[in-house]
Amino acid sequence: MRLGFGLLLAIWLGGCAGWRPPVSARGQEELAWLESLPYWQLQGRVGVRAEQGSWHGSLDWIYRDGQDRLVIFGPLGQGKVVIQARADWVRIEKTNGQVQVSDRPQSLLKEALGVAVPLQALHYWIRGLSAPGEGEVEFGPDGRIIRLRQQGWQVEYHEYRSVGSYALPVKLSLTGPRGVHLKLIVDRWEVDVEPKRA
């Protein structure tokens, strides 16, 4: 009996990081909705502390048709930076009209923003989802992510806000390699607030 209990306890402890409390039917609907959003937009603020320096600015982010478009005002004194990205491609345009295109997004993002942001993963993290691939995830009692570790980053979710029938993150902090810190505050989400019915 003791051996059986010890084995169960070891299994439970070993799986704690990815353990998820029972999710209600409503919670499952929310997860399906988050994963299938064809369009979303947010306005908010971003703060970065990295080796190359610290900066903060405003952020407009639109996702549509498989492409992310971010407009960041204020990074490293550059004025405005416009980022268009897909899974294996990024285009960055600066206020001075300089345009750079690369199939190595993180390298170019580090050059432009001073930090190698994992933009494709952030596309999921910003919605309160883990990105595809391995990672450790901790959930709150409502079934929403409160902390995750993926791709060398730790993401902490400090606040969610109702958007239509469901909820999206509005305060996140991220810690990455070499002591990089990011803070994201979403002032406004714009999404399809109800799931599409077949």
Image (spheres, rainbow, N blue to C red):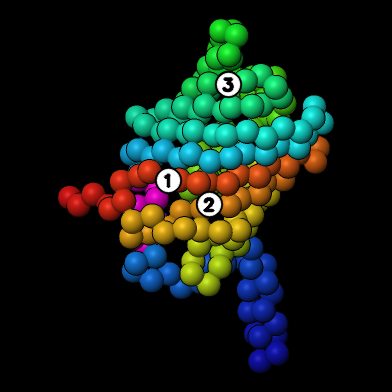
**How far across and how far down the image is residue 88, in percent?**
52, 23
| Quadrant housing residue 139 | bottom right
Taking 107 as reference, is 168 left or right?
left
Query: Do callouts 2 and 1 mark residues in contact (Cβ within 8 Å)?
Result: yes
Q: Is residue 45 visible?
A: yes
In the orientation shown, which residue stands out farthest toward the bottom? 1
> Relative to residue 98, is residue 188 depicted above or below?
below
**How far across and how far down the image is residue 117, in percent?**
64, 33
Whether residue 30 is in magenta: the answer is yes
Give the residue drawn at x 51%, y 58%. Answer: 160
Which disc, if any, is residue 57? Answer: none
Q: Earlier in the sequence, mark 3 or mark 2?
A: 3
Residue highlighted by disc 3: 81
Q: Circle 2 sits in a helix, a strand or a loop, which is it?
A: strand
Residue highlighted by disc 1: 189
Q: Circle 1 sits in a helix, a strand or a loop, which is it?
A: strand
Is disc 2 surrounded by few (<14), some (14 to 19) or many (20+) residues within 10 Å?
many
Give the residue drawn at x 53%, y 21%. Answer: 82
**How far across and how far down the image is residue 138, in percent?**
60, 62
Q: Circle 3 sits in a helix, a strand or a loop, which is it?
A: strand
Start and end of the magenta stretch? 28-36
Observer-nearest of 35 and 8: 35
Give the residue drawn at x 68%, y 72%. Answer: 13
Whether residue 63 is in magenta: the answer is no
Residue highlighted by disc 2: 170
Q: Earlier in the sequence, mark 1 or mark 3?
A: 3
Give the residue drawn at x 67%, y 67%. Answer: 14
Observer-nearest of 74 and 130: 74
How far, Cα to Cα, is label 3 from label 2? 22 Å
Q: Is residue 110 visible?
A: no
